Image: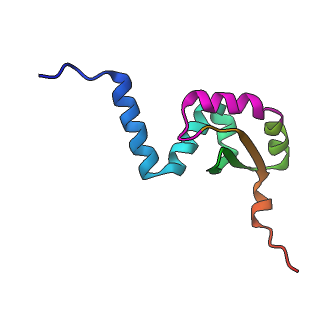
Amino acid sequence: MAGPARIGDIVESERQKIWRRSPGLGLQQLWQEAVGDEVAAVTRVRTLRQGVMTVSCASSGWACELSLMAPELTERLNQAGPPEEVREIRFVHQAQERLKYRK
């Protein structure tokens, strides 16, 4: 008969299930834990590719302020255990995502 499961093992198993089913949801939740509710309310994680996380912000002011905090936020995120190491965070204003450039 197996002994009781360790809580850390259970949490890790559930976290891995979330990443597999919905990586965006997992990243947003991780982001909210790292930055708090106020910042999470005005930001959304868009991607995490090759160690670069892109976060859209409700205003250019938020993007600028969070860019100054990027080293601290990167450390917090990596301590929380993302699916891959975050080396850099790029902050963009949401309006920038909608721009279409014409030649």
Q: Please, which residue is most extreme toward the bottom here?
A: 103
| Colour style of the rendered protein structure | rainbow
Residue 32, position in %: x, y? Answer: 60, 37
Q: Is 24 located above or below residue 3 in the figure?
A: below
Q: Please, which residue is most extreme toward the right here?
A: 103
Magenta residues, as a range? 68-84
Residue at 51% across / 44% down in the picture?
A: 26
The N terminus: image quadrant: top left
Question: 24 or 71, which lies in front?
Answer: 71
Residue at 34% across / 29% down in the picture?
A: 10
Figure quadrant of residue 40: top right
Residue 84, position in %: x, y? Answer: 57, 41
Q: In this view, does 39 lie to the left or right of 16?
A: right
Q: Please, which residue is most extreme toward the left here?
A: 1
Q: Please, which residue is most extreme toward the front here?
A: 50
Residue 51 among magenta residues = no
Q: In this view, does 90 lie to the left or right of 29?
A: right
The C terminus: image quadrant: bottom right
Question: 3 or 41, which lies in front?
Answer: 3
Q: Is the magenta stretch mostly helix, strand or loop?
A: helix
Figure quadrant of residue 77: top right
Residue at 39% across / 30% down in the picture?
A: 11
Question: 88 or 23, which lies in front?
Answer: 88
Q: Is 87 located above or below residue 59 in the figure?
A: above
Residue 86, position in %: x, y? Answer: 65, 38
